[in-house]
Amino acid sequence: MRFFDRLAGFPLLIWVYALMLCGLGAVFLDSASGASVDGDPGQAVRQVQAVLLSALLAAVLAGIRRRKLLQAAWPLYFAACLALASLPFLGVTLNGARRWFRLGGLTLQPAEFFKPALILVLAHWYRLRSEGGFRSTVLLPLLFTVLPAASIARQPDLGSALSLFPILLVMAWAAGARARHLLLLLGAGILALLAFYPFLHSYQKERILVWLHQGAMTREELKGAGYHLYQSLIAVGGGGWFGAGLRQGPQNVLDYLPYRSTDFLFSVVAEETGILGASAVVFLYLGLGVLLCARAARLGDRFGRLLSAGAGGYFLTHLFLHAGVCTGLLPPTGLPLPFLSYGRSSVAGAWLVLALAGHATWRRVRTVAPDRHL
Amino acid sequence: MSEVSRRIRLLVLLAFFGAGILCFRVFWLAAVEGPLWRNRRAAALYGATRPAAARGAILDARGRVLARDAPSYGLAFQFRAFRRAHPFALLVQCDHLLRLLHRELPARPESLPEGLVEGDPLAFTDPPSRLRRAISGLGALPAVLLRRKGLPRSLAATLRFYLHACFRPAAGLRREFAGREGLLLLRMDLRARERPELPLASLVAELCGLPPTEGATRVLERIEASVRSSRKRLEELAELCGPSLPLPFSRREEAGRRGNLFAYLDALDRFLDRRARTLTQRRIRRREEEARLRRGRVWWKRLAAWLSKSETGLRLGPVETLVAQRFRLDRGERILLRDVPLDPIVTLVAGRKEDYPGFRVRESLRREYPRKARGGYPYRWIGLVGQRNLQRNPKKTGRESSSGQGPGEGPQGENREEDRSGAAPPLPGPGEDLDVDPAKSRLHFTDPEWLAWKEEARRRLEAVRREGLRSGLSGLEKTCDLWLSGLSGYRRYLRDRSGRVRHLVEERQAFPGVDVALTLDADLQDLALEALRGARDHPRNGRPPLGEDARAAMAVLDARNGAVLAMAWLPERVGGRLDRRNTAAEIWHYAVLGSTFKPLVAYEFLRRFGPEAWNDFEPCGGSIRFPGESRIRCDGVHGRFAGREDLARVLSKSCNVFFAQCGRRLGLSGLSLAAGRFGLWEVGEAFLEPFGWRRDPAGPIPLRKARPPHGRAKPAGTSFGALYDRVSLARRGIGYGLEASPLSLARAYAGLGTGGLPDPHLLRRIGREVLPDPEPRDLHLDPEVLAVVRRGLEETVARGGTANRSGVGRFGLAGKTGTAEVSRRRNNAWFTGYVPAGSPRLALSAVFFQVPHGIHGGDHAAEAVARFLEALSNPRNEALWRRYLEASDEEGR
């Protein structure tokens, strides 16, 4: 009976929802990778395999005991940091970036695994610091985030590095950090971005400059730094209300849209399903984040609540960054949309995040004691 | 509600807000800006080609080809593809790149050598010994050059590409690398990291499993064999191409030089080098300008621009841009040779593509003029009207379509056309006086089908020009473009990012153009041309021949129906090459008539005033004096004038005194009627203008000639008409100040000879449809008056006549000479007539323009006609004689 009680606590709705999103992603992935002559039609199959395997693994991890998870938080974080730090020495270079480890025929992107580790360690940190000062609620967690983010940015993977900060903000906010502290953090972040600008790679600077005047790109920019953005805007803008139909989007099928199965999948969605389809995907994805946040609001234990909120923040951050880049709201930077975009590390990382959220509800502590005593 | 719930609810609200912004952005892009993005997408995705239709042939009256389309092959060359794949070119380019880096880089790494070989840069024309030294230099380069140490990223990548490519032939030294040259290059990179100081040849030898010293030699031998073999292939092609390839130069003083293929490659290399420097300077200036503009607008853009200043590598620096322009870009294709023979050049290049990277055989259609060598024909030129033509002078092209003027004609001709348009006089009917009516100010060819054709032709020509197809630029090629050009095909397709055609959206086959047959007889044309040449080159009256530059024209018309049988002109070559401009437009332009106008004056005078009118004429004493100092001279002393028959005498003698007085008596309206009756100024509208030639002058009495007598200023308040004093009218009575084209004069004489005014036409058949000959216009001439005038023309060529000296009279011809002073030292010498005199079949007009003083119409012009008729009466040309001078009306067609 105890097993069935525990099973009843399993966040089935969220997992089914996530699996549904994965199925939707597989459909679009099939269109993005299989419709073009130069595409890789096996991507969708590999993605489905990765989803099933990751979901299974996540289900197992979700059942891990709370104590063990708390004990493992910092070691996991440091292990992820170590993996990031060893990338310049052990990683392989693909497309000019050193972001991956090669294990046999498999490539792993440690940045994707660092995100769940960061959520776990932040939840661990905040669980006993609900009303701390600026130092404990903002400054130190920021330190946990900034150093690995700098390492990720050096790979270079600016998108992944930037995606860590909204997660930090969401978790700090959910943990009870003061609004003015967070606003201060936000302002400092913007200033830091500006200060960080001169140290960016030249191609990153060019992309930012092109994004700033995306309405008046020169012919040279259309073929160079602005190519990704321009093609993505054409794909989204050419979709109309109902889109061109699956595997029918010209920018997709004719190979104009670069990285369409990973960083620009939302452009494929918008091109092939139009405004209605793209909006539906946005709200479906939003639904996952909202479900996790709602679950967090209902949870009694602080650690679980923070894990759920962190997971919600994770998915919402990826949604806004990915779709923002595809629609030209944000400067082009490579960030996949978990569950939809191709990327086995991304899928595994997302399911690990869901495993943390699942753990929060499945293995929650059924007490109403104040948080600080948990 | 707990604090946590409130906080999470705020998060959810923010998330919904963000999702709303995202959806609104998608809506904005896809719905509001949707058409814009779809247009941009279409511009990138869709491509179109227009396969040219084979152009119809132009045939002469007897079906012989004057112009036709023939397949042609050209040898195209893309230097970028050549230098990136050809072993010899790779070696040369590698040397140039090293030199450029050594010279331009402000802080170059120490390992960077000055070049592969000492002294001058390596050239395609260098001897094999120098190549060998260069290959040794290549092998001695340190492996560190493969790494990015000390060089900007793009420069290092370019250098690595050329070094890799040079060592590619060495892959054959090890079985593992055979067919997998990429693997060798990868291993080179990895090994270079470990042993940066190692010479490249030794490094490659090591990778191939060879002993260091001996292996390096083998690697270099391999490269040398590859370079030598590729050079030998080039030599084969160079031999076939010959030594006269036009070398590309950017400096004007060097232009026009020629050389063989190797010289061409060297010249092209230098040319691209110079151009790359120019482009780089221009680009840097433009970037600075852009940055300045960008800085000035919005604060955050200014901030971004300010921040970008700290990183010099934000965009390519000057040296990187220069290297990019010089060694990576330049995708343009150049035509090395046109009309190359199918065998051996095409076979060589097309059959061994791997030996000739960058060379491509381009198949196209070429317009061929089989009789071009014999002289000018009124059908040329044909050319491609592309966007470049339109962009160069869009206004001019716009005017061309409306005026029918050839684009080959300069702006001067255009201005002339503009000056004269709208000033044409009305054609007065018999007995009518001139009254200028703007509504009738232009003559119209009233046949509605003709007008419809003209409109359709203009529309089609415009469309064709916009689409950049093969189109006639002047002459008949332009006028008959509607039929000749056919209908070009159309292919619209979707292309992918690499430019490959992925889906054919629309395809329409090309329809070839139809043949057009002319009334011109190529044999008659040749005879006319020969006659003009003979008259020009033959010394007369102790004077030397006129020379190559003499301008002359001859028109031969079928006097019964107006079919133009020959239109020849000199010179057919201007400046040593066939004149690309419409020579016919120059030649068939009007010229001062002189005495050839007198028969028309004679008819009008006799019809209007009768023979008694000249009883009170002043007798001819060699000249006639007018009040003041004006005087008109006569070539002889012709005494008194009396009786109707005396008209024939004075006509044959071309008495200026008589006709000067006729002009005074006829007045302005009478003279205009004399010209207009015989259609002197009609031919322009109906015939010349559709063929792209300028029409006849604006009026029978050009107003610009009107000046007050004795050079005094025009008195205030007097009209131009009043200023036509007696001298002016007298001068126009002898044909001075009146202008017409040879064709219109031949037509007028056909009217005199037959009594009906034919419409000149040049088209006989379009496709299978034979065009009917236009009916001659009945002039309702007074037969008695006409008989006197005709007798005068017959006496002109007889003994005692002005054309007697040329001997033209022996062919039964009737005609009139004309000598018009166009300047103090220059005359226009005319002879116009019809043959046979009794029953005219041919009307002929010959003119030598601007000949020296002392040469008369009875000299070269009459001799040209005599030579023409003599050649026609030659037994060899019996068929022609019978066809055009003895045949009945039906047979003549």
Image: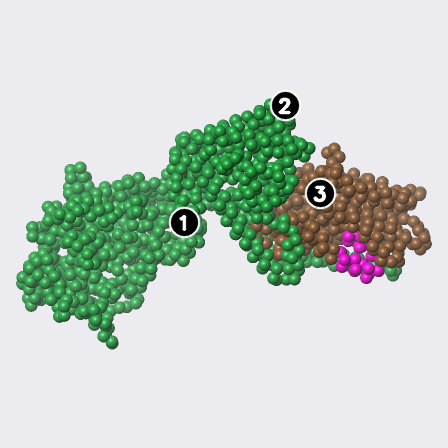
Closest to the observer, A236 or A113:
A113
Q: Position of residue B718 (x, y in %)?
A: 23, 74
- Between the C-alphas of marks 3 and 2, the distance is 48 Å
At 60% from the left and 23% from the top, the residue drawn is B214
- Residue denoted by label 3: A342
Q: Position of residue B720 (x, y in %)?
A: 23, 70
Closer to the observer: label 3 or label 2?
A: 2
Is residue A184 a member of the stretch shown in magenta? yes
Closest to the observer, B168 or A14:
B168
Whether discs 1 and 2 lie on one chain: the answer is: yes
The secondary structure type at the circle numbered 3 is loop
What number is the disc on residue B385?
Answer: 1
Q: Determine the main secondary structure of the stretch shown in magenta.
A: helix
The chain drawn in brown is: A
User: Chain B's shade in the image?
Assistant: green
At 24% from the left and 66% from the top, the residue drawn is B703
Which chain contains the residue that carries disc 2? Answer: B
Whether discs 3 and 2 lie on one chain: the answer is: no
Which chain contains the residue that carries disc 1? Answer: B
Q: Amino acid at mark 2?
A: Pro
Residue extending farthest to the bottom is B717
Magenta part of the chain:
A165-189
N-terminal of the pair, mark 1 or mark 2, is 2
What's the colour scheme? by chain
At 44% from the left and 51% from the top, the residue drawn is B387
Q: Does residue B448 sit above or below B146 in this rendering?
A: below
